[in-house]
Image (cartoon, rainbow, N blue to C red):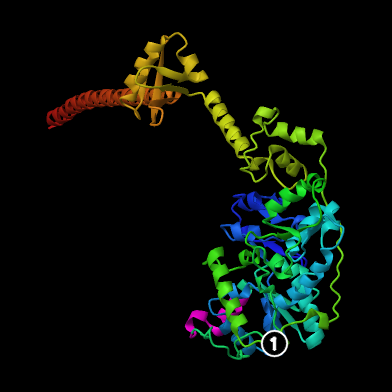
């Protein structure tokens, strides 16, 4: 991870679903090796990808360790106005921060009071359009994607920066900490605060060091009784006047307290892109000055990326209203309200062109489209499934190495289908599709096998074989003997069947030849054994005759010898 990276990717969690890309308003997501990552120089830090990723493959730079290093030492804390909508018991959270070493909890809305004064001054300018610059994502969007409209950005710092300047004026070099629901603030404020946290990070810190907030007793205050705010549980003075409504729709306009100027609110990055894309046409018909309250989040900061998710925007707004009324009801006299005129803070700022768009030659785009099987306009579906608005945008992203051709679902389906068709066409096994009435399809191998057969004959063979699938069938086709092992697959949606004739003729023939060889071998062995037996019998017979003849001669000799002895006596 580079220190400059704000939105981080967790490759091990990425499942290549393209949800981050589909929802990214500026398509600052790239894919490589089946994982996504954020293109830093194109990202406007809206945090949309962090919220929408179902696999938590997108996160952001955390600063909790830096905050923990401050704990126990004096520091000051700036809390965004939406703080009171993020917690059921914000007074308890404030008390925990003061227990952690915070010497002052100040509302960022104090800085918004300074900014609103500056905004009023610009309402008398000769610009037709004035874009508010409190939202860092809006500034990023214009600087990176619509730099020709930089002149319409009000050159005033955001309330958070104005508040940082005020805190520095009041508390000197004490470490400053800012907390809000905005991820983009981390980058915007890194030169103005020592630590910038989101509410999620603050929740993690509290849970780690103090336990669950629900385990504490709920702190109640009588809204009808004017009491001096307990410094342990409430923000410290000075207090804002009207700027606590800054994070809501129309909040900036409400804070200005001027009715005689044209104004409008535009929320959501996509709506802002649509507005800026056609702004040239609008400039020709605008009369006077129009203040455009611009916010990247629909519903304002109350719907920031790191806000609590268990309450909807309406419930959050009611919670904010409740606590704003409570804070207003407390005994806060005018001397404790901030008066920007009493301070000399430098609140001017400049904007720079940070656009980095790379153009792709049309011939390269067309070449990639052809490689994706989109050689003609009819194949450019523009279905947005890959995350890009058009197929041409996708092709340009491929050329810029931000996307891969396989990210196109239509391309993949066609590719897989063509592979499937090729397998069916090239397989040596006959494939027949038939229903209850007729043959529907024969692949090339089946056509060759049944080339002299009528369709009805092929159908009869298929029906007969399908009645006894998964056993070897002997078939005589075109005067030749075949052995097939049929495999049957049903097509329930189409009401048909697929019959695969696996040709096992060679195997069966080889098996028969082997059996014949075995039979002949056994016969030969039997013949040899029989011959040996006969030979043995013949030898035995000859031996018997020879012994009998020898015995006869011996008897004659014996008789002769005995007779000769008798004559001599």
User: Where residue 366 appears, x then y in whole percent?
Assistant: 76, 33
In the image, 162 versus 100, the foreground residue is 162
Q: Which class describes the residues within 10 Å of circle 1: few (<14), some (14-19), or many (20+)?
A: many
- Taking the spot 61% from the left edge, 81% from the top edge, the residue there is 327
Looking at the image, residue 131 lies above or below residue 508:
below
In the image, 429 versus 268, the foreground residue is 268
- Taking the spot 67% from the left edge, 31% from the top edge, the residue there is 373
User: Where residue 190 appears, x then y in whole percent?
Assistant: 78, 73
Left or right? Give the position of 227 relative to 105.
left
Left or right? Give the position of 224 relative to 99.
left
Looking at the image, residue 57 lies above or below residue 205:
above
Q: Which residues are magenta?
A: 202-217
Outermost residue to the front: 260
- Res 200 quadrant in image: bottom right
- Res 333 quadrant in image: bottom right
Query: Which quarter of the rendered picture does the C terminus lie within?
Result: top left
Magenta stretch, main secondary structure, is helix
- Taking the spot 81% from the left edge, 46% from the top edge, the residue there is 280
Query: Which quarter of the rendered picture does the N terminus lie within?
Result: bottom right
User: Where residue 264 appears, x then y in whole percent?
Assistant: 71, 57
User: Where residue 378 appears, x then y in whole percent?
Assistant: 65, 28
In the image, 100 versus 400, the foreground residue is 100
Q: Can residue 211 be found in the magenta stretch?
A: yes
Looking at the image, residue 73 lies above or below residue 136:
below
Q: Secondary structure at mark 1?
A: strand
Q: Can residue 397 be found in the magenta stretch?
A: no
Total numbered labels placed on residues in the image:
1
Q: What residue did someone put label 1 on?
A: 104
- Res 56 quadrant in image: bottom right
């Amino acid at each position: 991870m580079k220190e400059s990276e704000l939105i981080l990717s967790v490759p091990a969690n990425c499942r290549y679903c393209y949800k981050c890309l589909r929802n990214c308003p500026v398509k600052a997501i790239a894919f490589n090796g089946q994982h996504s990552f954020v293109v830093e120089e194109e990202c406007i830090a809206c945090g949309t990808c962090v919220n929408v990723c179902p696999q938590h493959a997108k996160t952001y730079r955390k600063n909790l360790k830096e905050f923990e290093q401050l704990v126990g030492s004096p520091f000051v804390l700036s809390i965004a106005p939406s703080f009171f909508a993020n917690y059921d018991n914000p007074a308890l959270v404030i008390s925990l921060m003061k227990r952690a070493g915070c010497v002052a909890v100040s509302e960022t809305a104090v800085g918004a009071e300074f900014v609103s004064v500056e905004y009023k001054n610009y309402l008398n300018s000769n610009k037709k359009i004035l874009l508010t610059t409190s939202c860092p994502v809006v500034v990023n969007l214009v600087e990176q994607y619509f730099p020709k409209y930089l002149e319409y950005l009000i050159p005033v710092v955001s309330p958070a920066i104005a508040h940082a300047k005020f805190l520095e004026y009041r508390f000197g070099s004490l470490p400053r900490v800012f907390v809000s629901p905005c991820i983009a603030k981390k980058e915007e404020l890194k030169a103005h605060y020592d630590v910038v946290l989101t509410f999620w990070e603050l929740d993690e810190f509290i849970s780690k060091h103090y336990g669950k907030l629900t385990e504490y007793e709920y702190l109640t205050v009588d809204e009808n009784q004017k009491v001096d705010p307990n410094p342990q549980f409430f923000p410290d003075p000075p207090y804002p006047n009207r700027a606590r409504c800054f994070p809501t729709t129309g909040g900036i306009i409400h804070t200005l307290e001027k009715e005689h100027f044209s104004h409008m609110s535009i929320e959501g990055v996509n709506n802002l892109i649509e507005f800026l894309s056609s702004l040239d046409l609008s400039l020709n018909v605008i009369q006077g000055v129009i203040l455009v309250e611009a916010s990247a989040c629909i519903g304002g900061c109350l719907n920031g990326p790191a806000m609590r998710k268990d309450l909807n925007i309406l419930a959050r707004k009611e919670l904010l209203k409740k606590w704003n009324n409570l804070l207003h009801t407390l005994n806060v006299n005018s001397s404790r309200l901030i008066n920007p005129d009493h301070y000399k803070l430098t609140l001017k700022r400049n904007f720079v062109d940070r656009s980095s768009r790379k153009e792709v030659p049309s011939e390269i785009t067309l070449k990639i489209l052809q490689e994706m099987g989109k050689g003609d306009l009819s194949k450019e579906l523009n279905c947005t499934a890959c995350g890009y608005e058009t197929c041409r945008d996708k092709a340009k992203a491929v050329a810029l190495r931000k996307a891969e051709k396989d990210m196109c679902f239509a391309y993949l389906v066609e590719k897989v289908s063509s592979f499937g068709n090729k397998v069916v066409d090239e397989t040596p096994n006959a494939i027949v599709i038939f229903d209850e009435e007729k043959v529907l399809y024969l692949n090339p191998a089946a056509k060759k096998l049944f080339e002299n057969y009528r369709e009805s004959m092929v159908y009869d063979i298929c029906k007969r074989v399908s009645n006894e699938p998964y056993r070897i069938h002997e078939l005589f086709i075109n005067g030749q003997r075949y052995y097939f092992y049929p495999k049957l697959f049903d097509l329930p949606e189409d009401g048909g069947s697929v019959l695969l004739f696996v040709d096992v003729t060679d195997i069966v023939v080889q098996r028969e030849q082997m059996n014949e060889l075995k039979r002949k071998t056994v016969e030969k062995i039997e013949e040899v054994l029989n011959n040996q037996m006969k030979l043995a019998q013949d030898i035995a017979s000859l031996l018997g005759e020879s012994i009998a003849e020898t015995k006869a001669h011996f008897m004659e000799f014996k008789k002769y010898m005995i007779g000769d002895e008798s004559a001599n006596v």
